[in-house]
Amino acid sequence: PDSIAQKEFRLRSELLYAKENLEIAPAQEQEKMLEEIVTLQERMQQLTQQIGEKYPQYFELKYQLAVVSLSELKKNLMDQDVFLHFFSGQTDTYLLCVTPTQERFIKIGNTAQLKTQLHRFLNFFQSADKIEQSPQAYAKVAFEVYDQLIGKLELTEGENLIIVPDGLLNFVPFEALVQNAAFTNLAALPYLINKYSIRYSYSGTILQKQAVARKIRNTKFLAFAPFAGNEHRTGYSNLNYSRDELSTIENQVDVQITKNQAATKTEFFRRAPEANIIHLSTHALANADSLQPRIIFADTTLLLSELYGLDLNADLVVLSACETNIGKIRSGEGVMSMARGFTYAGTKSQIASLWKVNAATTGKIFSDFYHALIDGQASAQAFHQAKLKHLNNPAIRPSQKSPYYWAGFIFLGPDRVIAMPSKSAFSNGVILIGISIAIFLCFFLFLFRQKKKITTE
């Protein structure tokens, strides 16, 4: 019932706010806040128990998610899949490497030393020009990180890497690592993207749950672009690329785009549960130290905690905004980002960003990605190919092939073919009729002018 669902949502939100506020509260206030958290947890436990007694199917679906066993994980992997699960301990970092036929548990190295190395690497993505200004230095540290993390695994070209990161690794674009430090130019570096398709997950259990086929229903593609024009919420700049981001596929698929003042959070809440593809082209705010990641709509802001109350069943959510996979890192949980929130809400896969991405470049990559989906490619492979297309495009100058421009968005979830809602027969028929009428009128006008010319002569 809605009343219980709302109560559950409110308690979860209050608990999340309380825990986040505890981390920044003065020492003299923490004891009182801990007491409030304990009270909230007790209320949440009581409510969960009531739900389990009265609504066992819902309880089993939401609260009794069995952890996938190693044998089950291996069984569900495809022949070319390599599952890489990192664990950052206080002293050392480890890697569980799983294929359909074997598994290895490997000590990567000292966690503190690895953090220092990762900070050096991630510093290159603080702005667009840092890699361009020191490309040799970037190639050196990108190789060192590669060699430390997976260089000794003897991977085979063409394998699909499924990465479950931990700690700072949540912010690392593995595709931008290089297999040797020899530098020629930014376009020609031996990036991992050239040899492997790479996607991410929050755990093997979540990945298995997301891979379960959704209920069969009509496909619906929704897009929200609150800042696509001049008439929008004050305090935020125009996002001119929003107008063009979906325009290349608008004539090929049945995408319903809501723009500017109409693109409200209220409208998103109303329509999102019925969509199988959701594309959000907007502003977003996040920081590893901030309280709540958020996405900006025309009327107000969508907080991470609000996603916990949604029930979505989308095959794909594209978060075309800055830092949508950035947030606080919680030990044993991972990064608390907007992408993580959409996963919790029930979406099968997401595309999210790791930094303040370049709008023009990513808009073109998304265009190629959707074209590949229309052609029937599986989603993660389609995104992989769209990035490769950018790297291999001779019309793009080498500096624009810096990883800053193409590695900022990552794919999270299973690699599945996603049904794209095609234009209705009626819509296509109207277009064809319109074209036919236009051709007929042009031909008629030509004959009329020819006849008038003869008569005049």
Image: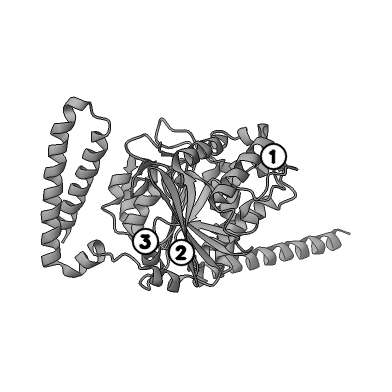
Alpha carbon separation for disc pair 2 and 3:
10 Å
| Circle 1 crowding by C-alpha within 10 Å: few under 14, some 14–19, many from 20 | some
Numbered disc 3: secondary structure: helix
Q: Which residue is mark 3?
A: 206
Towards the viewer: 34 or 407: 34
The tag on residue 399 is: 1
| Circle 2 crowding by C-alpha within 10 Å: few under 14, some 14–19, many from 20 | many
Above or below, 33 against 350 in this view is: above
| Residue 245 in the figure: left or right of residue 190 | left
Alpha carbon separation for disc pair 1 and 2:
32 Å
For the N terminus, the quadrant is bottom left
- Labels 2 & 3 near each other (Cβ < 8 A): no
Say which label, 2 or 3, has the lower sequence index.
3
- Three-letter code, disc 2: Pro
| Residue 48 in the figure: left or right of residue 351 | left
Alpha carbon separation for disc pair 1 and 3:
37 Å
Q: Which residue is mark 2?
A: 414
Q: Residue visible at 59% across and 52% down?
A: 365
Q: Is residue 134 visible?
A: yes
In this picture the colour scheme is one colour
